[in-house]
Image (spheres, rainbow, N blue to C red):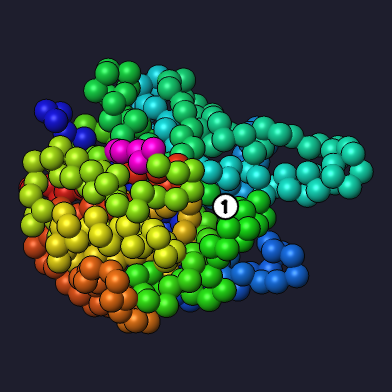
């Protein structure tokens, strides 16, 4: 890769807090207090989930047609870096800043009462608008909010959605279609998702427990994380991306882990880095039996004893927002003066059937960290690994 690309600014919100300062504080402390039992999603029972409890900003009146919890979540993250985005628009022009965002739920939660009424009565309620749950709504809202006139697209590839926005943005910039891009994603809790995972017997009734012999499923979360991405040098660079597809099964990863392994290897090859150059790996780590088994095998084979952790016990699995959320954690870790890493929260129940991963304890420091990787794997065997690097001054 001859051209260099950078993540110039980060805005985020999730169950750890609203904004980088709050998220950073709770992330490195391994604070799971944002994971709480929530009602209203499954019939007659509560479920452990990472919900955002703070108030969200209102959608501007002139954009009321885009109003949904998902877009309000996105707006909270966008407003944290609004100054940087508007400076890029002033520099490059409104037609040269692209919007490439990822989601899996969009505004489904806002439409679920109307869909339920249609099932009961045969008619949608007055004011029901399908476009609220249209995946395109996310990118179209952001483009309209900033008055942009260039490229806008939403990627929806389940749990890899927001990580893949960086790959798409890089291709668009390399093709000369834009000079900067708003990338990342947002997803919000909804009954459709909760009941879907419940039907697959994948929801854990307690805090998820990645890579433990006692792991028994995932927790779902919500949030948003967005970056301004450009060729303008900044402290965090995009070093490499690897994308693969298992072509194995609609909801089950290839048990041999070839797709996961190849995605990580391709990211390394593209970055020009060796496995020992990776100071930390953010694992996909959903705490399901097969996902953890496959990922542990691929990670150990390629990266050996790399310090690693799954942060999903801290936020829940934020689905379409997971990729950019966990990239945000790398962004924060690379710039942390103390070199502290996101910890792996679990019961320390070692699974003898898994390779011995180097799971990060709370308070672990790597002061000289220069490169970090994150994995995102999705239904359909869709895989992406991304490496971020700390740029030398």
- Spot occupied by residue 235 in the image (x, y as percentages of width and height): 18, 48
The N terminus: image quadrant? top left
Report x, y in % for residue 167: 31, 34
64 or 110, nearer to the observer: 110
In screen coordinates, is 116 left or right of 21? right
Tell me if 170 is positioned left or right of 320 in this view.
Answer: left
Helix, strand or loop at mark 1: loop
Residue 328 seen by the camera? no
Residue at 18%, 45% (x, y): give it. 265
Q: Residue furthest right?
A: 121
- Residue visible at 29% across and 71% down? 353
x and y, in percent, of residue 131 in the image: 67, 32
Considering the whole magenta stretch, tell me its main secondary structure: strand
Is 379 placed above or below 180 here?
Answer: below
Q: Is 244 included in the stretch rendered in magenta?
A: yes
User: With respect to residue 381, does 21 lie above or below?
Assistant: below
Q: What residue does disc 1 label? A: 188
Q: Residue at x 52, y 57 (%)?
A: 222
Q: Is residue 137 above or below residue 106?
A: above
Q: How many marks?
A: 1
Magenta stretch in the rendered image: 243-247
Residue 100 in view: yes
């Amino acid at each position: 890769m001859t051209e260099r690309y950078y993540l110039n600014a980060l805005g985020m919100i999730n169950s750890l807090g609203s904004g980088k300062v709050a998220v950073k504080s709770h992330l490195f402390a391994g604070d799971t207090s944002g994971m709480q039992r929530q009602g209203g999603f499954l019939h007659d029972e509560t479920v452990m989930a990472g919900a955002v409890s703070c108030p969200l900003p209102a959608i501007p009146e002139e954009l009321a047609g885009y109003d949904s919890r998902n877009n309000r979540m996105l707006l909270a993250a966008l407003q944290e870096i609004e100054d940087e985005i508007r400076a890029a628009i002033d520099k490059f022009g409104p037609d040269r800043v692209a919007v490439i965002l990822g989601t899996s739920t969009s505004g489904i939660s806002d439409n679920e009462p109307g869909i339920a009424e249609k099932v009961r009565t045969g008619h949608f309620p007055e004011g029901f608008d399908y476009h609220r749950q249209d995946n395109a709504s996310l990118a179209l809202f952001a483009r309209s909010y900033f008055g942009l006139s260039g490229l806008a697209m939403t990627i929806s590839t389940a749990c890899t959605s927001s990580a893949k926005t960086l790959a798409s943005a890089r291709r668009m910039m390399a093709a000369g279609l834009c000079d900067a891009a708003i990338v990342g994603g947002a997803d919000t809790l909804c009954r459709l998702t909760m009941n879907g995972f419940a039907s697959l017997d994948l929801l854990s009734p307690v805090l998820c427990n990645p890579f433990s012999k006692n792991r028994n499923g995932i927790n779902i979360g919500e949030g948003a994380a967005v970056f301004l991405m450009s060729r303008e040098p900044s402290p965090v660079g995009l070093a490499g991306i690897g994308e693969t597809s298992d072509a194995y099964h609609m909801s089950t990863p290839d048990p041999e882990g070839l797709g996961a392994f190849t995605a990580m290897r391709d990211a390394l090859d593209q970055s020009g880095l060796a496995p020992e150059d990776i100071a930390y790996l953010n694992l996909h780590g959903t705490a399901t039996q097969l996902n953890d088994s496959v990922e542990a095998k691929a990670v150990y084979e390629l990266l050996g004893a790399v310090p690693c952790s799954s942060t999903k016990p801290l936020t829940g699995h934020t689905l379409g927002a997971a990729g950019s959320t966990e990239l945000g954690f790398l962004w924060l870790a690379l710039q942390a003066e103390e070199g502290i890493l996101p910890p792996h929260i679990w019961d320390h129940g070692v699974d003898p059937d898994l390779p011995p991963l180097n799971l990060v304890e709370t308070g672990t420091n790597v002061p000289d960290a220069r490169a970090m990787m994150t994995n995102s794997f999705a239904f359909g065997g869709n895989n992406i690994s991304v490496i971020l690097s700390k740029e030398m001054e």
